[in-house]
Image (cartoon, grey):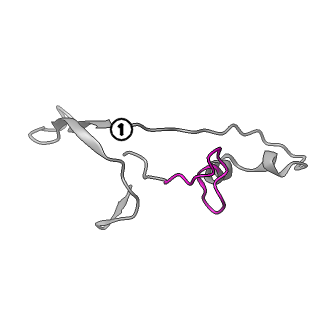
Amino acid sequence: MGMVFGIQREEEPSYTVVLDRTTGVTPPLSTPYEIRQYGTRYAIEAAFEDSSTGDNKDETKSPFMKLAGYIGVLSDPQNEGREGIAMTAPVA
């Protein structure tokens, strides 16, 4: 996901490989896999109700834009500490 023709565009979270079963495996009898251990991670989510009234701008904001505002994308961070939060690529 973070690589396109060998160019890495997103920062990947660091991890330790706990178990590596990617070599010496003969598909389809067994699927290659890797078990990874990541450090502390946080997740945030936003509820969304489609409000047709449009009276309150904050209520009609998409969940993506609410989350983007929280971490400081396209505006000052809208979180308690007013600190930007770096995005990393999703884990594949």
Q: Secondary structure at mark 1?
A: loop
Q: Residue 66 in the image: x percent, y percent? A: 68, 49
Q: Quadrant of the N terminus?
A: bottom left
Can I make out residue 39 in this image?
A: yes
Can I make out residue 33 in this image?
A: no
User: Looking at this view, is 15 or 3 the one in front?
Assistant: 15
Q: Residue 32 in the image: x percent, y percent? A: 20, 38
Residue drawn 66% across and 59% down?
A: 76
Disc 1: CA contacts within 10 A as few (<14), some (14-19) or many (>=20): few
What residue does disc 1 label? 39
Q: Residue 52 in the image: x percent, y percent? A: 86, 46
Q: Which residues are magenta?
A: 70-86
When the figure is inspected, residue 85 is found, relative to residue 9, above or below; the finding is above
Task: Indicate the quadrant where residue 80 lies.
Answer: top right
User: Looking at this view, is 87 or 49 the one in front?
Assistant: 87
Q: Is residue 75 magenta?
A: yes
When the figure is inspected, residue 18 is found, relative to residue 78, above or below; the finding is above
Task: Answer left or right for 65 relative to 13.
Answer: right
User: What number of labels is visible?
Assistant: 1
Name the dominant secondary structure of the magenta segment. loop
Q: Is residue 76 magenta?
A: yes
Residue drawn 61% across and 56% down?
A: 72
Indicate the amino acid at tag 1.
Gly
Task: Answer left or right for 58 relative to 35.
Answer: right
Residue drawn 39% across and 64% down?
A: 9
User: Looking at this view, is 29 or 6 the one in front?
Assistant: 6
Residue drawn 91% across and 49% down?
A: 55
